Amino acid sequence: MIFGHAITAQQLFGQLLIGLINGSFYALLSLGLAVIFGMLNIVNFAHGALYMMGAFVAYFLLHELGLNYWWALIGSPLIVGAFGALVERTLLVRLRGLDPLYSLLLTFGLALVIEGLFQNYFGASGKPYAIPPQLAGAHNLGFMFLPNYRAWVIGFSGFVCFATWFLIEKTRVGAYLRAATENPTMTRAFGLNVPRMITLTYGFGVGLAALAGVLAAPINQVRPGMGADIIAVVFAVVVIGGMGSILGAIITGFTLGVVEGLTKVFYPEASNTVVFVIMAVVLLIKPAGLFGKVA
Amino acid sequence: MSANPIVTPAGALPRETRQFAVAFVVMLALIAVAPFVAYPFFVMQALCFALFACAFNLLIGYVGLLSLGHAMFLGAASYVCAHAAKVWGLDPVLAILAGVACSTILGFVAGALSIRSQGIYFAMITVALSQMIFFFCVEAPFTHGEDGIQGVPQGRALGLIDLSQPALLYVFVAVVFLFGFLTVYRAVNSPFGEILKAIRENEPRAISLGYRVQRYKLAAFVLSAALAGLAGATKAIVGQNASLTDVAFAMSGEVVLMTLLGGMGTLYGPVVGAIVVVSMQNYLAQYGQWVTVIQGGVFVACVLMFRRGIVGEIANALKWTSL
Amino acid sequence: MATAEAAAPTLVVSGLQAWYGESHVLHGVDFEVRPGEVVTLLGRNGAGKTTTLKAIMGIVGKRSGSVVFAGRETVGLSSDRIARLGMAICPEERAIFASLSVRENLLLPPRVAPGGLTLERIFALFPNLAERLASGGGKLSGGEQQMLAIARILRTGARFLMLDEPTEGLAPVIIRQIGQTIAELKREGFTILLVEQNFRFAATVSDRYYVMEHGRIGIGFGNSDLDANNMEKLHVRLGV
């Protein structure tokens, strides 16, 4: 008995699972935001809308082209990522020398356009997306039932986060990225095509958002509003973690998802706002964020 | 900026003040004429939003801080005012003051949390905080959730002026708007405003000169929140309701659009922008969700090609610096 | 073939002007560098020496005039394209990437031409670097950073190097090492444009000199012109 609620193991682990799922999405999305911010120094306000696009592209691939989930898992990030690269190349590049505020506003306006368009064509209600048959069903772990698809989401997200971290911190390509982030002028003076790297980085960050959307599609419904619903929490996650660190974004994302899940068990009324409250506390103690480097 | 000296021949006003006076008279004339040309209710709504935009612009145009959650001040004040007028039966002036008090306190709390963070963080924090307020408004019993507070009485201002009379209500709203507008003008054209400008242009320098930069920023933030609250509370009396739309994220986005379109960092820009956007919404209401798309499109176009905004372009063409 | 190359200068700068934002820093710089030479730009602080190097490399805000490198007009090219023509810069601030390890710093600049130094050669020139490969770039001492900054551009195959104040703030022992390195590179046929405040050091490696004043070239002279009388005038000009 905790706080007067009788809680079963099933409830606890059930919510923990949901918490980890949400944490996976928070981690993937804040990772994408951190990658984009590192290279471009802008906050991609369109991130939620692109996450939503990722889910819709998966839906479209299945219902119009008959391409199943596994195609969507690769195809959607590629398609939406390409769209992102196009946006960077044609629109964001024009704002590069200016106050970063303008780039922020551009992505903000872009989010409105994307969400408005999808709202128009698909209406506000959600479209179902089936769990792929290979991942249907569940395993009985004794203390709880673990649906296969949910285990997959957590595992695959963790893998993608780790792979991204590894790519950036441990590989040659990652070294190029880190150098261009730290000192783009000198990196370019060595002969590296920094503008192209910037475009590709934005596309990659967008692709991560789209991937999160595909993973989310069978769990939440595919709705035009799904990006707007999640973006505020993701921003709070990013503020808590701090923008400077890739690893920080991943850890904070997963952790806060779990915290949210646990709050839902012990103090359900606060579950909507617990992340924001934590953000407020972190801001008072460490404005740069828990892993942040720049205030 | 201006090559002319501040001190001009005895008796003449400085060039900037003359420009401002001309524009102000034009605006007064338009406000006086408007209710005869358009629906008074529509004009009153526009004035409330114009004040909201002026409040928002104080932060972005003069302090350089982009708040993407300003609806929280508009909406919170709106709810408190509506509740005060309807449930507590307060005089509309007191109800509005209650709303302003609420948004001021909220502004102080939100400001204290966010002011230490620079640009991008600041924007994200305002999003998160306003979402928190939104959730609160959805859950709190006194807001009645989806239904909102309806049937707010307009009452008698100061116990004398019957606001249910359209003409009197209009004058009341116009006075409130002008008060708010002139407050912004006064804040910007004062030693306080000069310091804000110095902070915006070179914060480290301002700090090294000994200014308590955070305090000035917080003061500007609180003032902005208070004026946004004033707009929200007045809007509640005019529209006789308070609803979730007033605290929704879309509202925060709209005020940014109004200011951007009208001209950031100009005094009249937000006013013009508000009128254009409100008119646009009325005209396009029949097209439903396309309004969002069009607004987003205008947004993107402004950021790419039209950064000075309407008033900014006019000021640039006329070489006037005080618009 | 060799005579033709010896005749045509590697770098010809004419009427080069440059701005940092509103500030007009270079007012028309003219000079040339011939293949295999070491040329030094001398001058007081603020004369525009660093800006000249940056303008040639294409990393200054705005520039106009003419910079012909290896027969190509480069004043309108972006810095990555200029680098790929075989030019490399070692900036005054060294610009070692703190978020990269020493090894990653060393391997970062891509090969722009065949004939870059092998890693073995580089470690022979700079033995300290071989020991510090795993360290973070930000953890190096001033001397080690300078060596790394020079080493990493040697790998690329660029044969025209611009070194901005390579001896600034370094201990005499390391300055000597750098001098030996530059002499070695000269023997191998590298062309080097040097910016130095330390005239004594420059005199040990340089063939010719230009003195810059207020964003322009003042005088130019060679080693043969250095007698006691001229040295006196030179010291006055340099404010030493």
Image (cartoon, coloured by chain):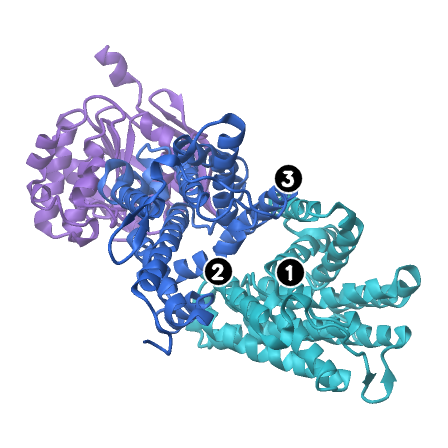
According to the picture, the residue beneath numbered tag 2 turns out to be B124
Residue A180 in sight: yes
Q: Is residue C114 above or below residue C178?
A: above
Label 2 and label 1: CA atoms lie apart by: 16 Å
Q: Colour of chain C?
A: purple
Q: Secondary structure at mark 3?
A: helix
According to the picture, the residue beneath numbered tag 3 turns out to be A121
Residue B251's label in the rendered image is 1
Q: Chain of mark 1?
A: B
Q: Amino acid at mark 1?
A: Met
When asked about the image quadrant of residue B204, the answer is bottom left
**Left or right of residue A177, residue A280 in this image:** right
Circle nearer the N terminus (2, 1): 2
Query: Are marks 2 and 1 in one subunit?
Result: yes
Label 3 and label 1: CA atoms lie apart by: 22 Å
Q: Chain of mark 2?
A: B
- Nearest the viewer among A218 and B110 is A218
Q: Is residue B201 above or below residue A122?
A: below
Q: Secondary structure at mark 2?
A: helix
Label 2 and label 3: CA atoms lie apart by: 29 Å
Q: Amino acid at mark 3?
A: Tyr
